[in-house]
Amino acid sequence: MADLKDALDLYNRVTLDVCTRSKTECFDLAAVVPKDPSVFYDDVHLTEKGAQLVADKIATYLLSAPPFLSPNGVSGQSNHQAQTF
């Protein structure tokens, strides 16, 4: 299992490095999601609790910046209208 952990850590570091060098926004989920059986049911697949945790972390991250962050610094609804095709 150590080999898989090392490979995933390397993958995450390279991904973050590419984001940094290309000035691309990137959110490091590996840094905020615990690696334990309550979150993952194997080495890469999330449990239901893990999926909810990831969704919450991503939502918090997205709502903390424009276009969702209001001018007064409070997160809320986007000013963008949903488009139907």
Image (cartoon, grey):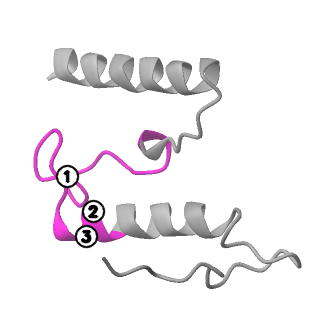
Structural distance between the alpha carbons of marks 2 and 1:
6 Å
Pointer 1 residue: 40
Q: Amino acid at mark 3?
A: Lys
> Majority secondary structure of the magenta segment?
loop
Q: Amino acid at mark 2?
A: Gly
x and y, in percent, of residue 48 in the image: 18, 70
x and y, in percent, of residue 59 in the image: 50, 69
Quick check: marks 2 and 1 in contact, CB under 8 Å? yes
Quick check: marks 3 and 2 in contact, CB under 8 Å? yes
Describe residue 9's horizontal placement relative to residue 1 as left or right: right
Q: Is 62 or 52 nearer to us in this picture? A: 62
Q: Amino acid at mark 1?
A: Phe
Structural distance between the alpha carbons of marks 3 and 1:
9 Å
Categorize mark 2 by other alpha carbons within 10 Å: few (<14), some (14-19), many (20+).
Answer: many
Pointer 2 residue: 50
Residue sitting at x 19%, y 56%: 46
Residue sitting at x 38%, y 67%: 55
Pointer 3 residue: 49
Describe residue 25's horizontal placement relative to residue 7 as left or right: right
Describe residue 35's horizontal placement relative to residue 61 as left or right: left
Quick check: marks 3 and 1 in contact, CB under 8 Å? no
Residue sitting at x 37%, y 61%: 54
x and y, in percent, of residue 61 in the image: 58, 60
Categorize mark 1 by other alpha carbons within 10 Å: few (<14), some (14-19), many (20+).
Answer: some
Q: Which residues are magenta?
A: 30-52
In the picture, the quarter occupied by the N terminus is top left
Residue sitting at x 17%, y 62%: 47
For marks 3 and 1 on the same chain, the one whose residue lies earlier in the sequence: 1
x and y, in percent, of residue 53 in the image: 37, 66
